[in-house]
Image: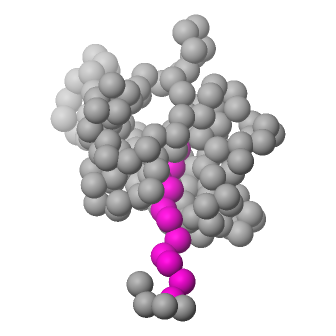
Amino acid sequence: MVDGERPEAPLLLLAHHGTPGACAAEQLAYSVARAWQASILHLLVIPAFWRDMMGDDWLNNAATRAQFGGYLEQILGAEAQQQLQAVAERCCGQGLAYRSLLKIGEPTDLLLECVRDEAPAALVLGSPRPKGVPGVRSRIDMPRLMQRSSIPLLLAPWGWKGNQPFF
């Protein structure tokens, strides 16, 4: 860096897919981004397991299966775009720099890939859903993520609303 040149703002990687845990992570990311003057990279992963949701007996021919698969992909894509847009609007409303990535695959692999490719300063994610709380089984392999991540992981507690001082 040359004297007088501003350092590049740190980048926070936010894993967010609209669940209550992800919403807690979003609030934590806003708090950290303001304190660090960081930008937010929002990674939304559509778990690959949705492709296995087409094994019902009524999908007994290739044409029906392909049509249903296209419909399901369209619905998931529209929901993902709504999530991306909502987080973008909230970041903009708080004056935070924002960009997003939408990927389909295994969540832990894609988080590690994003850490490697984007070089964020930290990864912000929500804690696992408590037992008995309904939701999608798209769990992150936390032991593997912690072992292989080269950056700090900031884990938002379940139900955290960002109303407690963090910094």
Q: How many marks?
A: 0
Relative depth, front residue between 149 and 98: 149
Q: Residue furthest front?
A: 3
Residue for point 65% across, 37% down:
24
Percent from the top left, x then y, of residue 118? 35, 62
Q: Is residue 15 magenta?
A: yes
Q: Residue furthest left?
A: 62
Q: Quadrant of residue 66?
A: top left
Q: Is residue 108 magenta?
A: no
Q: Which contiguous range is marked in magenta?
A: 5-16
Percent from the top left, x then y, of residue 106? 29, 37
95 left or right, relative to 36: right
Q: Is residue 49 above or below residue 63?
A: above
160 left or right, relative to 135: right
Relative depth, front residue between 149 and 71: 149
Residue for point 60% across, 34% down:
156
